[in-house]
């Protein structure tokens, strides 16, 4: 239980605001569970009630503060990540020029691919996304993690896939109307 006095100490927040938000999340959590159930297949387990509450809290946070994708990594940090990848590729080329074996070069290629994959979220250009696309990608990411915690993660991004169905239902429940084809295209880009 959260101490009401602790809530009152936060600047600009009242205890009523805090507890109203908690009630709002509980109501949204029941919707989230319905969205998971209606979007899923027999192979996908509906996440637990606690997980649905965390998903609802995250969706509420996305609605209130915007998508985390909307706040990209500072350009200076992104620049250093890109520079590091450039140096890694140059080192690979230098090793190749020295006559490294094919096995050694395939290890270099695997390491570069792994580094690119790991750094991609930090190099991502969020300015190219619209608000709807940001919202849908953020909700889909949260839903994917929830399904993963329940045992199986949907990988298909087609218009009839469970992940797209959930994202469309969540967007509709939050007052946005997107076609499954549009959401599918957005998720494939992200």
Image (cartoon, grey):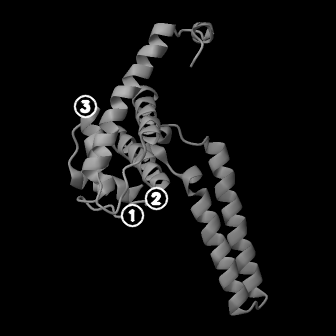
Whether residues under marks 3 and 1 lie with C-beta atoms below 8 angstroms apart, the answer is no
Indicate left or right for 5 with 184 as reference.
right
Q: Nearer the viewer, mark 2 or mark 3?
A: 2
Q: Nearer the viewer, mark 3 or mark 1?
A: 1
Q: Residue 38 placed where, x, y %?
A: 25, 49
Disc 1 residue crowd, few under 14, some 14–19, many 20+, Cα 10 Å? few
Q: Is residue 45 above or below residue 174?
A: below
Question: Circle 1 is placed at which residue position?
Answer: 155
Please state which of residues 132 and 37 is positioned toward the viewer in this rendering. 37
Question: Circle 2 is placed at which residue position?
Answer: 151
Query: Nearer the N terminus, badge 3 or badge 1?
Result: 1
Whether residues under marks 2 and 1 lie with C-beta atoms below 8 angstroms apart, the answer is no
Q: Is residue 107 above or below residue 54?
A: below
Q: CA distance from mark 2 to mark 1?
A: 13 Å
- The residue lying furthest to the right in this view is 98
Indicate left or right for 103 with 159 as reference.
right
Q: Residue 163 placed where, x, y %?
A: 33, 54
Q: CA distance from mark 2 to mark 3?
A: 30 Å
Q: Which mark is residue 175?
A: 3
Disc 2 residue crowd, few under 14, some 14–19, many 20+, Cα 10 Å? few
Residue at image point 41% right, 30% down: 60
Please state which of residues 60 and 55 is positioned toward the viewer in this rendering. 55
Residue at image point 76% right, 80% down: 94
Q: Secondary structure at mark 3?
A: loop
Q: Nearer the viewer, mark 2 or mark 1?
A: 2
Query: Nearer the N terminus, badge 2 or badge 3?
Result: 2
User: For residue 131, what is the image quadrant?
Assistant: top left
Q: Residue 135 placed where, x, y %?
A: 37, 40
């Amino acid at each position: 239980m959260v101490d009401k006095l602790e809530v009152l100490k936060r600047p600009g927040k009242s205890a009523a605001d805090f507890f109203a938000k908690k009630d709002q999340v509980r109501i949204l959590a029941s919707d989230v569970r319905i969205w998971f159930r209606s979007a899923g297949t027999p192979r996908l387990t509906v996440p637990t009630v606690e997980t649905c509450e965390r998903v609802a809290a995250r969706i509420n946070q996305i609605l209130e503060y915007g998508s985390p994708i909307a706040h990209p990594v500072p350009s200076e940090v992104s620049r250093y990540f890109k520079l590091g990848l450039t140096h890694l590729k140059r080192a690979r080329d230098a090793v190749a020029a020295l006559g490294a074996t094919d096995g050694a070069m395939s290890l270099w290629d695997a390491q570069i691919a792994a580094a690119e994959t790991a750094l991609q979220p930090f190099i991502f250009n969020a300015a190219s996304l619209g608000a709807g696309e940001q919202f849908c990608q953020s909700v889909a990411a949260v839903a994917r993690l929830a399904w993963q915690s329940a045992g199986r993660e949907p990988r298909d991004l087609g218009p009839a896939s469970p992940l797209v169905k959930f994202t469309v239902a969540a967007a509709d429940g939050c007052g946005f109307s997107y076609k499954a084809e549009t959401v599918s295209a957005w998720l494939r880009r992200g």
